[in-house]
Structures are given as C-alpha cells and as structure tokens.
Image: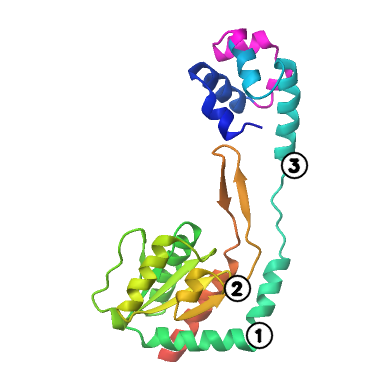
C-alpha cells in the first residue's frame, strides 16, 4: 500500500505511525483514530496528515484501504509447482545436455584447481559446490566476495566456475574478461545461454527454469526465489563424473 515516494516523505512522527501500523496490521482496521493516536504517541492531526500523504481522505478510508491491501498480500501464496523440476529433468536426460556435462567434467578433472564463484543464492551454490567436489577428492575453493578483483597464482592450471541465474553483473563480467586474458578456463552455470556471462564463458551449462522474483513489501525491493534444484543437480552430477574419471 505504501509507495517508496510516500515513505520518503514521512517526517519523524509519521514514521512512528508507519512503524506502528506495520507491527499491528491485524488490529488497525478496528481502531479509532484516538486509539491509534494514543498507542503511537502522536496527535490525531498528525494521523490525518499521514492519511493525506498516502492518498486517503481520512482515517476511515485509510483503514478500509489498508485492510484490503493487507488481505491481498496474505493471499499471495508462493506456488510450489514441481512441473518446472520435471521439465528440467527431462531436458537433463537429453543427449546434448549429458554430452555437455561429459565434456565439462573432463576439463574439471584435468584442472589442478577448481574455483567456484557466485553471489546471493548463487553464492550459496558456489560454497556447496566447493564442499561437494572436495568430498570426492578434488581440490576446490569458493570465492565469498566476487566483488573484489580475482587473481590466481596459476591461472592456466585453474578452472573457474561461475553460478548466476540472470547471467549478468558488471563485476562478474569484468572478472571473466580478465580471467580469459590470463588463459583461465571459465565455465558458467546460468538460467539462459543468451546471457552475457554465458556468452563470455568458454563453456556454459544452461538449465532454463522460470525466473521468480518476489516483491519484499517491507524493504520495497525484489528478492530472487528462483529454484536452485537444477544447479544442485548439475553440481552433483559433474562431481560424480569427475570422481569416476579419476578412478
């Protein structure tokens, strides 16, 4: 209900009302203006000014609109549709997909070092990949903060694997360019092969699932909740292929 412009226009007292409303969303529709003024420690005049700033003619209209907005938000249940996972597994069993994994696993098996990179949820996948590959006997590390310059002591003996759903990001793109100048092999795991990171990489694995962004009402931003199931599958499949090649 509250826009970014409206929130930025609040003064100190209006922020008191805003915070109280968010913390007590269930009882706001049933409160009188005097009750809200008493509990949020402001005057009724301040509440009326607050209502005007959020485009309401008065406190009664604000309560109605707030109740509707609150109920609408609660009804936005995240869909746990496993169809996308079944579709991915179908693509993962295709000949071209498995052959691509075979080629990449051979490159990873021959490399002296494996460096996994990612940010956000992809950063968690990078950490998981490093641990999983280490478990099968391959030396692997993950970069916790790829925002910094990445420098490798033996670039030609290393393979860098980048995880990115969107396949964009200036810092990652810049790092790829420098890594390739130093003859480091770069592999990317992205949602689409048409992204910048996928096109810059020497090898790419793309998995194609629905890119899901959830709006965070509290911080007025979007959170990436795209499933990481395909990435986990790719990590574990590659690691097992590398293990079998070493044996």
Q: Which corner quadrant of the image does residue 42 belong to?
A: top right
Q: Is residue 139 visible?
A: no
Residue 26: name its quadrant: top right
Residue drawn at (56%, 50%), measured in percent from left and top?
223
Q: Local crowd at mark 2 within 10 Å, few (<14), some, or many (≥20)?
A: many
Q: Which residues are magenta?
A: 25-45
**Residue at the spot 65% in from the left edge and 83% down from the top edge:** 93
Pick the front one: 77 or 12: 12
Apparent side of residue 147 relative to residue 2 in the rendered image (left or right)? left
Nearer to us in this view, 108 or 221: 221
* x then y, percent, for residue 84: 69, 67
Q: Which residue is mark 1?
A: 94
Indicate yes or no whether the magenta region holds residue 30: yes
Q: Which residue is labeled 2 in the image? A: 207
Image quarter (top left, top right, bottom left or bottom right) of the C terminus: bottom left
Which structural element holds mark 2? loop
Secondary structure of residue under mark 3: helix
- Residue 39 seen in render: yes
Q: Is residue 27 magenta?
A: yes
Q: What residue is rendered at 74% in x and 34% in y?
A: 71
How far apart are labels 3 and 2 at the CA level?
A: 30 Å
The residue indicated by pointer 3 is 75
* 225 vs 193: above or below: above
Question: Mark 3 or 2 closer to N-term?
Answer: 3
Of the 4 image quadrants, the one containing the N terminus is: top right
């Amino acid at each position: 209900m509250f826009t970014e412009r409206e929130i930025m226009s609040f003064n100190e007292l209006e922020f008191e009302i805003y915070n109280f409303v968010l913390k007590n969303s269930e009882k706001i529709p049933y409160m009188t203006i005097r009750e809200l003024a008493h509990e949020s420690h402001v005057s009724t005049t301040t509440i009326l000014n607050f209502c005007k700033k959020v485009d309401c003619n008065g406190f009664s209209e604000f309560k109605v609109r707030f109740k509707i907005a609150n109920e609408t938000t609660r009804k936005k249940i995240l869909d746990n549709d496993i169809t996308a996972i079944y579709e991915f597994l179908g693509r993962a069993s295709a000949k071209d997909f498995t052959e691509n994994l075979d080629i990449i696993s051979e490159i990873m098996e021959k490399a002296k070092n494996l460096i996994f990179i990612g940010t956000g949820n992809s950063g968690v996948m990078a950490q998981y990949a490093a641990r999983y590959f280490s478990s099968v006997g391959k030396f692997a590390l993950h970069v916790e903060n790829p925002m910094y310059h990445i420098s490798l002591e033996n670039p030609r003996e290393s393979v860098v694997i980048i995880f990115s759903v969107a396949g964009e990001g200036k810092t990652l793109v810049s790092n790829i360019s420098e890594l390739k100048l130093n003859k480091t092999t770069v592999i990317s795991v992205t949602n689409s092969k048409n992204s910048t990171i996928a096109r810059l990489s020497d090898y790419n694995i793309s998995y194609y699932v629905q890119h899901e962004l959830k709006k965070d009402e509290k911080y007025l931003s979007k959170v990436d909740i795209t499933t990481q199931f395909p990435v986990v599958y790719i990590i574990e499949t590659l690691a097992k292929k590398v293990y079998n090649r070493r044996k």
